[in-house]
Image (tube, rainbow, N blue to C red):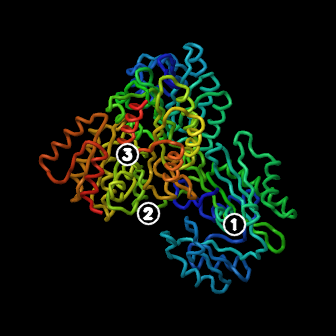
Amino acid sequence: MAIIADENTKVIVQGITGYQGSFHTERMLKYGTKIVAGVTPGKAGTEVHGVPVYNTVKQAVNETGANASVIFVPPAFAADAVFEAVDAGIEVVVCITEGIPVHDELKMYWRAKQDDVILIGPNCPGVISPGKSHLGIMPADIFKEGNVGIVSRSGTLTYQIAYNISNLGLGQSTVVGIGGDRIIGSDFIDILRMYEKDDQTEIVVLVGEIGGIDEENAAEFISTEMSKPVVGYIAGITAPPGKRMGHAGAIIEGGKGTAESKIKALEKAGVEVGKTPMEVAEIVRAKLGQS
Amino acid sequence: MLIDNKKGDSMKLYEYQAKQVFSSYGIKIPNGRVAFSPEDVDEVAKEIGSQEVVLKSQVLVGGRGKAGGIVMANAGDSASKSRELFGKDIKGFKVERILVEERLDIAKEMYVGITLDREKKGIVILVSSVGGMDIEEIAAKYPDKIGKKTVNPVWSLWDYQVRELLYEAGIPKEHFRDVFAIIKKLYNIFIRYEAELTEINPLVITSDGKLYAADGRLNIDDNALYRQKEMAELRELTGSELERAAESKGINYVKLDGNIGVIANGAGMSMATMDLIYLEGGKPANFLDIGGGASSDLVKASMELIIKDPNVKVVFVNIFGGITRCDLVAEGLVKAFSEIEMDIPVVLRLAGTNEEEGRRIIENYMEKNPNKLFLVKTMEEGAKKAVELGGV
């Protein structure tokens, strides 16, 4: 089954004629993603890697029946692109763009919420259901089809953990990068809820980092609402307070958001937390072996 | 709770700049202005005309009062007192400007602050009938004197929410109307300037019953500066010298106090690399994220930056290539080794996109230049090697 995207997902790319949009469209097509249209205002009638381009999302949806969108437009226009996608009836919006003003992110969140649209990101690597579909910028080759769900705030770290899992002969149902900004469309709980219902997923890996209390909230959810085992990893044990560690959301403020507090909350909820990416993969293997 | 956002990365306005914004919205501020020299201070003190003035160092760091950054003076000795303040080091920041203000006759101090609410995806307003200390301290000591409310940014702020805040915070009845107006104005400022945080602390009631923003903060979202042009013009780079150098090159760098330099791609990966070093018993010297799709020049610049830190005894370069290509990272490192004079060892882990090509480039280089570079297979192995070479 997988979550969010599968072989039937019909995808449009907003900002397809830009450098990033075009580059990643080619990679996603090569992976087998059903990209049915691209959108760039003023570029209707052209093609990018054989994909027809439309002026508006509405036209693209009317012509192709697309139900998902991947957004590559620059930060100043990204919120507008999200609103356009939601208005046109798109059900899954994956916003890759980094550097969107946070006041725009607040509005994006509430707009998606109003129509029950799944918004992933912004500032995220996207979603991949190995062997089925890839909506994003991940190095697709390292993933293998399997039964491990991964949800993460970080890109590269996700690749590392997925790579370790694949190297142990296991694979992933779906991998979701929820993004590193403070205000994001879907948080850990939204994705965990989907994995819990998904037939293909047997175990979930949660990759968190310092900042906010999303991991703590996820721990609460896991202990009360999840039957599937969850394995955790938290980056930032050595991060000093008051400094943003790259991601806008990765900052320890007012004594909150420390790695210790997150690890403690997860362990209390019965989540085994790996100390290294390799250890996470090994715990997953051991737990799958037991069940 | 509001954060003492000392070293975050949002754009912070100086107190006098924040107060100018408050004043333009009709919030009263003490009479005075900023001065850049003792002569200037003397002039402002005379303009103010009051017997007593306050000299407030303008530095973008919290706790300046306790660090001796605020001094009382009178019209006669303000210049000489400011001479001691100019150039003084306040928690790593040099005093280059002083806000000279009339001294208020304070009857009561209160608090108003607004910031983002990550969890509720909204804007949180905090009001207290107690002020003059950190909001965390107010919350700990006077939990019944705080009102807190998260506003949905789409629906905006309604009057009943402000009324509830005033009741919850225990604001004296006779000041209801004034505080009400100030909260509304501050919310409008927060929205208009796309702030991440704004605060009036203390909000002073003088003995003649007037309300003043005696201190103020306004931090603007960096990502919004392209359309907040007046704010963007006020922008100055902050942080340590190395951090400023990194920022100007577009490198995400945070200095730490260990001796093992770190270069990685991705924020999560960079933190995980630091953590691994720590688990192996070592201490990372920095956080450094070259981001996605780094060029060889950026890799070289990162290496140059890191080895400027005299504590660094070894550098661990940990790359998992997704969008980043291992061959470009390898080229950048070889460029760095050939062009920069450096005698500290480097541990390198390359995995992912174009790993083979990257390793070949490094192995070719190592044939001619042994002992400087250690190529490892996993990040766990790399951390161990780096700690071994760096000592503890």
- Residue B241's image quarter? bottom left
A76 versus A211 height, above or below: above
**In front of the other: B207 or A74:** B207
Give the alpha-carbon distance from disc 2 to disc 1, as whole Å.
34 Å
Q: Please name the residue shown 59% across and 61% down the image.
A: B4
Q: Which residue is mark 1?
A: B141
Number of other residues with Cα within 10 Å of mark 1, as a class: few under 14, some 14 to 19, many 20 or more: few
Q: Residue A288 in the image: state x and y as whole percent.
A: 41, 31
Residue farthest to the bottom, as pictured = B76
Secondary structure under tag 1 reads helix
Q: Residue B49 in the image: state x and y as whole percent.
A: 73, 79
Q: Which residue is mark 3?
A: A276
Secondary structure under tag 3 reads loop
- Residue B254's image quarter? bottom left
Q: Amino acid at mark 3?
A: Thr
Residue A19 visible in image? no
**In front of the other: B276 or A126:** B276
Secondary structure under tag 2 reads loop
Dot 1: chain letter: B
Q: Which residue is mark 2?
A: B240
Q: Please name the residue shown 66% across and 77% down the image.
A: B54
Comes first in the chain, label 2 or label 1: 1
> Do tags 1 and 3 sit on the same chain?
no
